[in-house]
Image (cartoon, grey):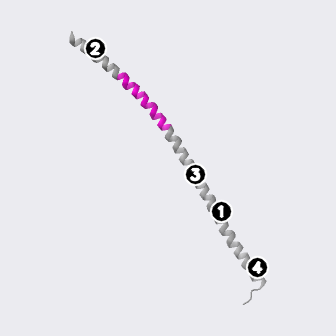
Amino acid sequence: MTLDSETIIALIGFATTISGYLFGRRKANNEADRAAYEAYSYALESLRKEFEARTETMRNEYQELKQKYETLEAENTTLRNKIQKLEER
């Protein structure tokens, strides 16, 4: 069986089409993977920033509560001392 030039050209065109399709699909997959990675990175960065902001807020709230506790503890001690003095009279 011999192949004429038109058949060879058609086969080359078909092979070129298939390889172009496969290359395009691979390139599209790479671009899709890159876009997914960028979206993932952006989401992680957003979560990190939110976590840091919440952590800072909680630190500030903790410091405020600690100061309030110390103030209440001092007031409690003062009141106990006053009660003790009153009981001694």
Q: Earlier in the sequence, mark 2 or mark 4?
A: 4
Q: Which residues are magenta?
A: 53-72
- Does 12 sit above or below residue 3? above
Residue at the extreme top: 89
Task: Please name the residue that numbered disc 3 is placed on.
Answer: 39
- Does 31 sit above or below residue 2? above
Residues under labels 1 and 3: Cα distance? 18 Å
- Does 68 sit above or below residue 5? above
Q: Position of residue 40 (x, y in %)?
A: 55, 51
Q: Earlier in the sequence, mark 2 or mark 1?
A: 1
Q: Which mark is residue 5?
A: none
Q: Earlier in the sequence, mark 3 or mark 4?
A: 4
Badge 3 element: helix
Q: Magenta: predominant secondary structure element?
A: helix
Q: Residue at x 21, y 11 (%)?
A: 88
Task: Please name the residue that numbered disc 4 is placed on.
Answer: 9
Task: Please name the residue that numbered disc 2 is placed on.
Answer: 82
Task: Please name the residue that numbered disc 1 is placed on.
Answer: 27
Q: Earlier in the sequence, mark 1 or mark 3?
A: 1
Question: Crowding at label 4, few (<14), some or many (≥20) Cα neighbours within 10 Å?
Answer: few
Count of numbered circles in the view: 4
Amino acid beneath label 2: Lys
Residues under labels 2 and 4: Cα distance? 108 Å
Question: Crowding at label 1, few (<14), some or many (≥20) Cα neighbours within 10 Å?
Answer: few
Residues under labels 1 and 4: Cα distance? 26 Å
Amino acid beneath label 3: Ala
Question: Crowding at label 2, few (<14), some or many (≥20) Cα neighbours within 10 Å?
Answer: few
Quadrant of the frame with the N terminus: bottom right
